[in-house]
């Protein structure tokens, strides 16, 4: 009974984790992003990071299709669908993490510049950027385990 209850709660716990990641992302995004030059460079880095992700995901899509077919043929259709679910969760985690990191980077630099020599606010900003990725990975993993 206890194990069944834990399994049934896993998707809900994953959703709660994603909500916390969104709250951290929103609070981070509300912080100052620096001067116009910093914003311009940050936008270029963000755009480049997303272009990289989408190109990588295009290549990954072909791999996912091939592995899906092989798993369906050699193991089972359910295993193949679980693999695709895991791949989708991984893609989402990468996307969320990359957005969080690129948003946090310029704000970390701004906080470091504005609070010299106290770098506590910059460290807090950097850790918040990492927390977004960490929460996304853990939350999506828990959701996937609970759903599968």
Image (cartoon, rainbow, N blue to C red):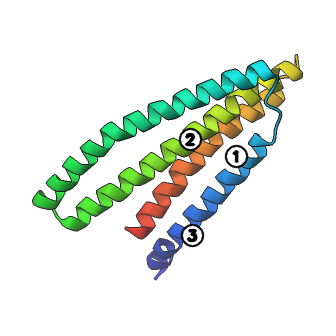
CB within 8 Å, label 1 to label 2? no
What is the x, y in percent for residue 98?
Answer: 56, 37
Identify residue for label 1: 25
What is the x, y in percent for residue 142?
Answer: 49, 60
Specify the label residue 60 is tagged with: none
Of tags 3 and 1, the one toward the viewer is 1
Instruction: Name the residue at 37% across, 54% down.
Output: 86
Neighbor class of circle 2 (other Cα within 10 Å; few <14, some 14-19, many 20+) is many
| Disc 3 secondary structure class | helix
**Relative height, residue 144 to residue 90 (above, below):** below
User: In the current view of this chain or complex, which residue is farthest to the bottom?
Assistant: 1
Identify residue for label 2: 97
Total tally of numbered discs in the picture: 3
In terms of depth relative to the viewer, which is nearer, 19 or 6? 19
Give how far apart the Cα atoms at labels 3 and 2 are: 21 Å
CB within 8 Å, label 3 to label 2? no
**Relative height, residue 38 to residue 63 (above, below):** above
What is the x, y in percent for residue 112?
Answer: 81, 22
């Amino acid at each position: 009974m206890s194990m069944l209850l834990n399994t049934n709660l896993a998707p809900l716990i994953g959703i709660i984790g994603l909500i916390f990641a969104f709250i951290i992302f929103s609070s981070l995004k509300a912080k100052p992003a620096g001067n116009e030059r910093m914003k311009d460079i940050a936008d270029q880095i963000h755009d480049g990071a997303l272009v990289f992700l989408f190109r990588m995901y295009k290549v990954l899509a072909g791999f996912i299709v091939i592995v899906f077919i092989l798993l369906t043929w050699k193991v089972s259709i359910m295993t193949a669908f679980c693999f695709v679910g895991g791949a989708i969760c991984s893609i989402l985690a990468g996307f969320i993490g990359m957005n969080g990191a690129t948003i946090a980077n310029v704000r970390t630099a701004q906080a470091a510049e504005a609070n010299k020599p106290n770098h506590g606010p910059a460290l807090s900003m950097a850790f918040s950027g990492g927390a977004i990725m960490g929460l996304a990975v853990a939350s999506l993993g828990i959701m996937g385990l609970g759903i599968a």
